[in-house]
Image (spheres, rainbow, N blue to C red):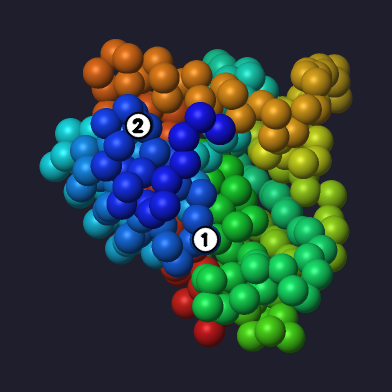
Amino acid sequence: IAAAYGSYEALVGAADVDVVYIATPHNAHLSNALLSLAAGKHTLIEKPLGATGDEARQIAAVAEAAGVFCMETMWTAFLPKYDVIRQLLADEALGEPLSVVADFGEWFADDHRILRPELAGGPLLDLGTYLVTFALWALGRPDSVSAVGQPAPSGVLGQVGALLTHAGGRQSALHTTLRSNTPTTGVIAGTEATLVIDGPFYQPGGFTLTSALGLGPLRYDEEPVAHESLHFQAAEVARRIAAGETGSPLRPLADSIATLDVLDRIAAACD
């Protein structure tokens, strides 16, 4: 590492720092983002953008006023696999998408920070962010949200099941847990075909498209290199900043805010 700083203030004040990546716990995203934006730095914020929808809106407003690049680092949106899926949806290869079914469960030891209430722990902001992002991306913002949760021993939510209803009666069934491992697959089912994404659905990997008439299946595969594929996101950020843009159409701040608004509604339903 060529340079190190004794404080966040010193880092954002450094003249040779072009972009700040905020990867602190969720409860610090707002204060850290506002510090970076106030210094006029292009700012990437680890998902979720804030701890609540209101925090996300505050960050977005300050970023707009500062005129700098600002984005949530939802790296899944920038993977080649999802570019292919975007094309399939745009070409109506699935017909009309009617339902999303997705899960994300992972076992965590009791001393992990995700189980600490003071660090905004629980499954929603870590794992549920991927699920809700996926559902809204495929079916749009929901009209209604219902959910049931069970606590973990530390007091944070340990497991959550949510049902979102979207325009036209479409539905998303989502499940997340911190207490056990699940297949972590994602499904978009349409009137003409069903797309099943291998687990982990949010990482590089493959998917299968099967016609409702039994034709196929068609298979897409890419090397499952996990988080090594963060470079796709980094390249997108560099392209947009070089072009003088303040965001990316693949993950605009409005989408990040919408995701957190739904997570807030899920959390409220579990109280």
Question: In the rendered view, would you say 113 is above or below 75?
Answer: below
Element on which disc 1 rests = loop
Query: 207 or 33: which is nearer to us?
Result: 33
Query: 268 or 8: which is nearer to us?
Result: 8
In screen coordinates, is 259 left or right of 61?
right
Residue at x 69% of width, y 34% of height: 227
Question: In the rendered view, would you say 182 is above or below 10?
Answer: below
Please provide percent x and percent y for residue 66: 16, 39
What residue would you read off at disc 1?
Answer: 25
In front: label 2 or label 1: 2
Residue at x 14% of width, y 42% of height: 65
What residue would you read off at disc 2?
Answer: 17
Callout 1 crowding tier (Cα within 10 Å): few <14, some 14–19, many ≥20: some
Please provide percent x and percent y for residue 43: 35, 39
Q: Is residue 141 visible?
A: no
Tag 1 or tag 2, which sits nearer the N-term? 2
Residue type at mark 1: give it.
Pro
Question: In the rendered view, would you say 176 is above or below 82?
Answer: below
Query: 47 or 181: which is nearer to us?
Result: 47
Please provide percent x and percent y for residue 27: 45, 66
Residue type at mark 2: give it.
Val
Element on which disc 2 rests = loop
